[in-house]
Image (tube, rainbow, N blue to C red):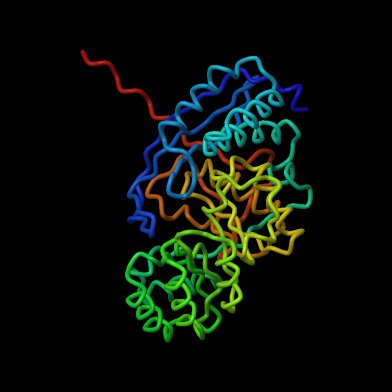
Amino acid sequence: MMDSIRIDRFRIRPYDLPLRRDWRSARGGFQRRRGWLVCAETDGEIGFGDCAPIPAAGTEDPESAESALLNACACAPGRSAAEILEMLDHGYVETPAARCALECALLDLLSQAEGVPLRRLLAPDASDVVPVNGILGALATLTAADLQQAAEAGFRVVKLKVGVEEPASEIGRMLALAPFLPADMRLRLDANGAWGHDEACRILDQLAGLPIESLEEPLRIPDSSRLQALQERATFPLARDESLAGLSADVDLRGLGVRRIVIKPAVLGGLRTALDLSRRATAAGIEVVVTGVVESAAGLWPTAALAAATGSRLPHGLATADWLAADLGVPPRLNGADLSLADRPGSGFNPNPEPEPEPEPG
C-alpha cells in the first residue's frame, strides 16, 4: 500500500500556542508552545503531523527542524510514501522531531487509505482507551487543593516535576503534602537529570515511606552502573527518558540500569522507532510509558495511538491538552483517567479551520 500512495506535496504551517501557566522543570521552562503543523497531501486526502521540537527533552533545535521540514517539502512531490519513509530513516536521524512529524503525516494518510485507525495500523490489537496520569507541574507550585482536584477528576497517579528547588525544600514540601494525598494516589516524580549520585542517594532514602510510583531521570550524568545501584536502593521503578535520545538500535536494554523507560516519539524520531523500542523493552522485562512533549492536538493524537499500540497498561503521560490555552484542533477526549480514541480511519486529528487572510488595505 505504501508504494501505491504518491505524495502530491508536504505543506507546513507554523503555530504559536500559549500555555495556561508556565511549564517548569530542572531543564528550564516555557510559556508558549511553538512548532509546525505538517500536512501530507495526495488525491484530496490529508495526513497530519506535528513538529514541536524541544531541545531540553532531546530533540533538535527549531532552526534545524524547520530546515528539515523545508527539505522534505522540496523532495516529496511525486514520490511514494514508501520512498519518503526510507528517506526519513536514512537522512533525518539528526532531526527526530521533524522526522516524527513527517512520518506521522504519512502514517495518518496510510491508515486512512487502509480504512483503520492509526493505532490498529501500528498494532491490530491496540486498545481503544489509554490510561493516563495527571500532570500537575512543578512540586514548588503544588497545593493540597491541586491533589484533591486531581483525585476528583479520577487520577490515581499524578506527575510532578522535581529538581526545580533545593532537595531539602522539595522533600519538606512532599512531607507536608503527604497527609493530604488520597489513600490510593501515588506520585510519579520527574527530576529531569537534576541531581548528582550522592545527592540522589540521600533523596531516595528520604522518599522511603512516601507513595512514590516512580522517579524519572534522577542523575545529571545518567551512568548505567550508577543508575543500577540507585535502582537497587529504591523500592519503586526508576526510569530513563531524555537520556534515551540517540540510543543505538542494538543496545541491550537490560543494561540501562532502570526498571522503566519513558518513550517520546518526537525524541526517538517517530512512531515506528518508538514502537520497536517498546516491544524490545517489554521482551527484556522493562516497563514502558509513552509521553508527549506538550505538543498540539496534531501530535497528541498519534502519540496516543502509539501508547495504545504498545499494550502497556501503565498510566501514560498524555493528559497535556489542558495545559494549552489554544490548540490546532480537538484533542483526544479525556474520560476520567483515560483517553478515548476515535474509531474512524486515521489518527483522529481534525484541524481547526485556517484563519482567513487579512484584507488588503485600501
Is residue 154 among the parts visible in the rendering?
Answer: no
Q: Position of residue 360 (x, y in %)?
A: 27, 16
Q: Residue at 57% of width from left, 63% of height from top?
A: 239
Quarter of the image that includes the N terminus? top right
Q: Residue at 64% of width from left, 26% of height from top?
A: 87
State left or right for residue 87 relative to residue 212.
right
Reply above or below: 243 against 354.
below
State left or right for residue 176 relative to residue 282.
left
Report the number of discs: 0
Quarter of the image that includes the C terminus? top left
Identify which residue, 169 or 193, lies in the foreground.
193
Rendering quarter of residue 91: top right
State left or right for residue 110 relative to residue 135.
right
Q: Residue at 70% of width from left, 51% of height from top?
A: 309
Q: Position of residue 279 (x, y in %)?
A: 73, 53
Identify which residue, 271 or 21, lies in the foreground.
271
Rendering quarter of residue 326: top left
Is residue 77 among the parts visible in the rendering?
Answer: yes
Q: Position of residue 117 (x, y in %)?
A: 70, 43
State left or right for residue 91 relative to residue 144.
right
Identify which residue, 105 or 45, lies in the foreground.
105
